[in-house]
Structures are given as structure tokens and as C-alpha cells.
Image (tube, coloured by chain):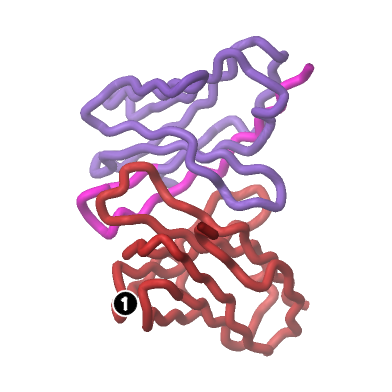
């Protein structure tokens, strides 16, 4: 049973518009959520995170929203740029338990068209 | 500051061969992890370690072994390679109190034929 799901394998947006990537989770024990960005032939790089005690975290063009009751989080990128084209992974962790192991979704490939 | 270094970057193994994937970090991180990523899939945890001398199994440990003799090194051993182990392997590290996620290596692409 997949505990972290990214239901959209791909997303295409125009440069300058908003990109919204979605993620759902099933395990109520998760208390920290992260987004990673991955370019081909590279390792994932950390992008932004949010604790379960918050519902929003912002870092420049990137904002993550958390809806605990719906067990849903989303990553908003505004404005989108061609360099944002990559695979985005959602991850969830129990920070204070189980060695901070993260469970990953399958990823969403974002393409930003010039 | 090199971060997390993985070697080799690519490797082709024959069925039944063995190899060790190397992972070294220079950030003095206590926690280290091995993940594998199959095509179109997310990352699955193979093994992890919370410090030198301490290792534990993750979600998909079968066919693999690890050791952690120092804080810096966390090698992953494949015994009797099988085609199902064809994947991209990522090593990662973090501090126990670091809320900024993992630092990943660049990966090892392994093909078993």
C-alpha cells in the first residue's frame, strides 16, 4: 500500500504561469513533509518542507500548502520558469521517530514551456 | 565541501556477480540512507544507519547488505546480483535535527545482465 501518492505523472505549464503539484498521504504518523527536485542523471535536491503544525510555508517562488484533515499537500511555483522543468518528488517523514526515514511518492514530471 | 559522494557512477554486472557501491559524506551527518529508484517510480529505502556501528533494514533490503564502521562511509554490498536489482541507487545523509531534508549523492546506475 503506497503511503505517499502523486497521482499526476506529468504536468505541462507555460512560462510565467503557476505550476501546482499535488501529493496525498495515508499515514497519520507523518509529521514532516518535503519536496525534492530532480534533474536527469543527478540526485534529488531538497526544495522546501513543512511541518505538520503549519499549513503554509513559502520560500521565494515556491510555496507548500498542507491540509492535514484531507491528508493532502501541494507545491505552488509562481511564476514558473523553463529551468523548473524537472521531476518533483513529494516525501513524508516522522521526524521524531524511526530515524527520520522518508517515504517518497513516484514523482511528477513538470515541463515549463517557453 | 563535497557533500555526498557515490562511486561508481555506472556499472554493468553479470547475474551472480557481487559488488560494493561506495558512499562517503564529509558533513559529519549521523544519519545515512540507501534508496533505489526504478524507472518511473519513487525512491524505495533499502537500508539506513543512525550512526557508526548501527544499521537497520528499510523497505526493500533483500539481496543487499551494509556496514557503517565510520561516520563518513556507508557502503552497500550486492551479493549474487539479479536482473531485479537493475536500478539507480542513491545514498543520502542528514543530521538528526536537520529539518531541511536529505543531502543526496548523484547516484549509481546499475545494470544486471
State which quadrant residue A12 falls in: top right
Q: In the image, is residue B34 part of the stretch drawn in magenta? A: no
Determine the chain carrying the residue at label 1.
B
Q: Which chain is purple?
A: A
Q: How many marks?
A: 1
Relative image position of residue A55 (x, y in whole percent): 29, 21
Q: Secondary structure at mark 1?
A: loop
Residue in the picture at 58% in, 82% down: B20
Q: Residue at x 45, y 73 (%)?
A: B61
Q: Tell me if B50 is positioned left or right of A36 in this view.
A: left
| Residue at x 36% of width, y 37% of height | A33
Please identify the residue farthest to the front as the structure is shown: B1
Residue at the outermost top position: A17
B29, A113: nearer the viewer: B29
Please determine whether, in this image, residue B113 is positioned above or below residue A2.
below
Residue at image point 56% right, 47% down:
A44
Q: Is residue A27 above or below residue B56?
A: above
Q: Position of residue B9 (x, y in %)?
A: 69, 67
Q: Quadrant of residue A107?
A: top right
Residue for badge 1: B52
Q: Specify whether residue A113 is painted magenta.
A: yes
Give the red chain's letter. Answer: B
Q: Which residues are magenta?
A: A92-114
Instruction: Residue B28: give x, y in percent of width and height.
Output: 36, 64
Amino acid at each position: 500500500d503506497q503511503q505517499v501518492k502523486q497521482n499526476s505523472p506529468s504536468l505541462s505549464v507555460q512560462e510565467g504561469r503557476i505550476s501546482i503539484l499535488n501529493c496525498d498521504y495515508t499515514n497519520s504518523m507523518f509529521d514532516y513533509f518535503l519536496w525534492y527536485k530532480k534533474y536527469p542523471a543527478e540526485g534529488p535536491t531538497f526544495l522546501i518542507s513543512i511541518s505538520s503544525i503549519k499549513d503554509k510555508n513559502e520560500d521565494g517562488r515556491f510555496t507548500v500548502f498542507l491540509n492535514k484533515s484531507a491528508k493532502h499537500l501541494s507545491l505552488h511555483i509562481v511564476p514558473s520558469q523553463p529551468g523548473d522543468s524537472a521531476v518533483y518528488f513529494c516525501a513524508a517523514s516522522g521526524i521524531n521517530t524511526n530515524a527520520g526515514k522518508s517515504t517518497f511518492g513516484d514523482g511528477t514530471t513538470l515541463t515549463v514551456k517557453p | 565541501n563535497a557533500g555526498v559522494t557515490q562511486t561508481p557512477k555506472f556499472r554493468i554486472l553479470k547475474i551472480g556477480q557481487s559488488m560494493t557501491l561506495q558512499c562517503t559524506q564529509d558533513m559529519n551527518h549521523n544519519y545515512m540512507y540507501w534508496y533505489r529508484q526504478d524507472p518511473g517510480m519513487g525512491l524505495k529505502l533499502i537500508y539506513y544507519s543512525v550512526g557508526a556501528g548501527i544499521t537497520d533494514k528499510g523497505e526493500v533490503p533483500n539481496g543487499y547488505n551494509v556496514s557503517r564502521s565510520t561516520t563518513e562511509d556507508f557502503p552497500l554490498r550486492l551479493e549474487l546480483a539479479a536482473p531485479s536489482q537493475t536500478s539507480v541507487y542513491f545514498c543520502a545523509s542528514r543530521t538528526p535535527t536537520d529539518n531541511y531534508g536529505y543531502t543526496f549523492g548523484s547516484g549509481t546506475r546499475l545494470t544486471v545482465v
